[in-house]
Image: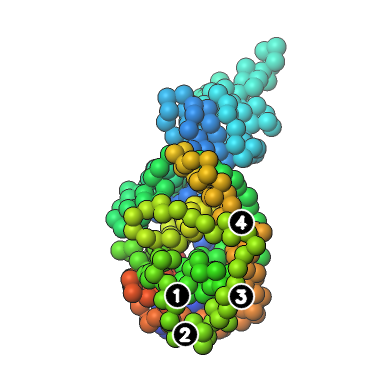
Amino acid sequence: METTPCDLRWPAGGATRVPYRVFSDPAIYQMEQEKIFRGPIWHYLCLTVEVKNPGDIRTTWIGDTPIIVTRDENGELHGMVNRCAHKGALVCLKERDNKKSLTCVYHAWNYKLDGQLRGVAFQKGVKGKGGMPEDFDVSKHRLQPIRVSVVAGIVFGTFSDEAPPLEEFLGDRITAFLKRNMDHPLKILGTHSQMIHNNWKLYAENVRDSYHATLLHTFYTTFKVNRLDMDGGIILSEKKWHHISYSKRATLDAAAEYTSAEVHSAKYSSELDGPQLLQAWDGFDDQITHSIQTIFPTLVSQLTLNSLAVRFVVPRGVDKTELYWVFLGYETDTPEQEKMRVMQANLTGAAGLVALEDGCINSFVQRGTRGSDDKASFIEMGGKLAESNESSRATEAAVRGFWHGYQTIMGFHE
């Protein structure tokens, strides 16, 4: 059943103007669950390394719908809604598990790892009395399946039969860069999550906003981790929905005029008491030392020096979002390389030296836009189009790309 269409009319200017109402309207939030999260879109579910063995189980989310990912005894991956076919209770309660079947604790309905119902407690009743009616057919009851597909060690899922093949949804350049970072034997180094007090789309904007890092993340600027006076660029997918932002630490232009004039944290030379935090090795031949890659709507793949991570957000209401972090290494890393990755993980995350500012600033926007449904943001840094620019990251092109996709899926028109 579809939600009632919203009466929102998008302001003139398309993706350069975003009505603040989209961050606070419960009706729009419900529309998003139907059109985006249960629509023809591929969503991050988990990593294949989390479900690599037969019987492995991983619970996750698509929007506000709980999901189970399993690997069965034949090695096949399955995705299904974490909702018993009997009375709707959660079937899997742990984030990770390994079992031969799935059993709902409420009435012990038992399912195969592909979601098919195996059996029902007291199906024949007790002492010939009660039980299911004679026409009850186990084969006609199962956990609701979803489509799953894998690229670069990432399991994606969708409710829709109309979603195109996954790599077509991503596009060639996005797929290739995702494989650059992630298509290796992965090893999970650590995980955590945090609640941020803002609408999920504000975080989606934030990770596509390439030029705020020089201004807001003063640690990056001061210690020359990621700055706009490094060579870098923005790549948008063919559909504009996904993006890559990258920079090259070795090509810092120390003479850039704006640095000393406009960015306070770039004026001074500072040293760390623990300089090993920023020691790194060249993991790739292209000189890229920092990259943020987004997959519409909620996935981020991040490489900062040698700190590799995926982040994904789960909406927890119109003004609350859970942000998950999974820090990664490669199985081929030496002990020294793994130690460096773990050390650099301190740059980001809920208590990191950098990313805590994003959770804070997004809540400022949530609070600042509340009660201003008739107003809109102004997104014209770098022009008015959503297009790639591999000569400058002083642009909001990727932000405009997100809103282009959002308008398209939601059906909001000027």
- Distance from disc 4 to disc 1, alpha carbons, whole Å, reads 22 Å
- Distance from disc 4 to disc 2, alpha carbons, whole Å, reads 29 Å
Residue 269 vs 341, above or below: the answer is below
Pointer 3 or 4: first along the chain: 4
Kind of residue at badge 3: Val
Position of residue 11 measured from the top left corner of the image (x, y, whole percent): 46, 82
Position of residue 385 measured from the top left corner of the image (x, y, whole percent): 35, 78
Asked if the residue under mark 1 is in contact with the one under mark 2, i.e. CB atoms within 8 Å, the reply is yes
Q: Nearer the viewer, residue 325 or 403?
A: 325
Q: How packed is label 2: few (under 14 Cα within 10 Å), some, or many (20 or more)?
A: few
Q: On the image, numbered disc 2 is attached to which residue? A: 258
Residue 248: quadrant of the picture:
bottom left
Pointer 3 or 1: first along the chain: 1
Q: On the image, numbered disc 4 is attached to which residue? A: 346
Q: How is the image coloured?
A: rainbow
Mark 3 or 4, closer to the camera: 4
Q: Most extreme residue toward the bottom, as rendered? A: 261
Q: Residue at x 57, y 56 (%)?
A: 276
- Mark carried by residue 365: 3
- Mark carried by residue 228: 1
Q: How packed is label 3: few (under 14 Cα within 10 Å), some, or many (20 or more)?
A: some
